[in-house]
């Protein structure tokens, strides 16, 4: 596991009225969901076609919290912080509406995702608002770390 990255399996509470999934809480809450230390904005990202790749970028200051609310996605992360004990390490996480997870990504970690189903929707929360004139991001091509997107048979 990359230092600072968290993958929190979320609980689905379901009854005859439907379901509820608690995604995140303020960091001052002692529960496992207490991870949001600063709020900037929240947005919804939709991929209408399976196999859409959105990768890679990292931030200098911004934290990301990702939640797949419909469909499924494969996330790939790589630690690019020279001072980190996990510098250079990569990890892959699959999240879906059937296996709800909150993925916490700290600054300095390259990240990207690929939709595994048509009509995949991701709720993304960021610690800072997006600055259109001066975005906090470094972008690199999706093949920068080799063939990490192919779904391999097992």
Image: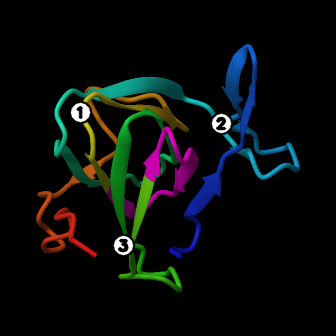
Residue at 13% from the left image edge and 74% from the top image edge: 146
Mark 3: give few (<14), some (14-19) or many (20+) Cα within 10 Å: some
Q: Position of residue 67 (x, y in %)?
A: 50, 39
Whichever of callouts 1 and 2 sits on the residue coming sooner in the sequence is 2
Whether the magenta-drawn stretch holds residue 103 is answered as: yes
The residue at which mark 3 appears reads as 80
Helix, strand or loop for disc 3: loop
Name the side, left or right, on which 5 lies relative to 70.
Answer: right
The residue at which mark 1 appears reads as 118
Helix, strand or loop for disc 2: loop
Whichever of callouts 1 and 3 sits on the residue coming sooner in the sequence is 3
Above or below, 100 relative to 122: below
Residues in magenta, as a range: 95-111
From the viewer's perspective, is the residue at label 1 or at label 2 nearer?
1
The residue at which mark 2 appears reads as 23
- Between 140 and 46, the one nearer to me in the picture: 46
């Amino acid at each position: 596991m990359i230092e600072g990255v968290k993958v929190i399996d979320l609980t689905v509470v379901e009854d005859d009225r439907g379901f509820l999934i608690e995604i995140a809480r303020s960091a001052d809450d002692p529960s496992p969901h207490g991870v949001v230390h600063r709020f900037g904005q929240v947005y919804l990202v939709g991929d209408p076609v399976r196999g859409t790749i959105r990768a890679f970028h990292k931030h200098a200051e911004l934290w990301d919290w990702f939640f797949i609310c419909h469909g499924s996605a494969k996330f790939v992360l790589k630690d690019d912080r020279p001072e980190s004990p996990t510098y250079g390490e990569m990890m892959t996480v699959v999240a879906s509406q059937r296996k709800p997870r909150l993925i916490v990504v700290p600054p300095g970690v390259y990240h990207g995702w690929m939709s595994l189903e048509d009509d995949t929707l991701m709720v993304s929360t960021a610690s800072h608002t997006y600055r259109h004139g001066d975005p906090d991001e470094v972008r690199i091509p999706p093949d920068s770390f080799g063939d990490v997107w192919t779904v391999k048979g097992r």
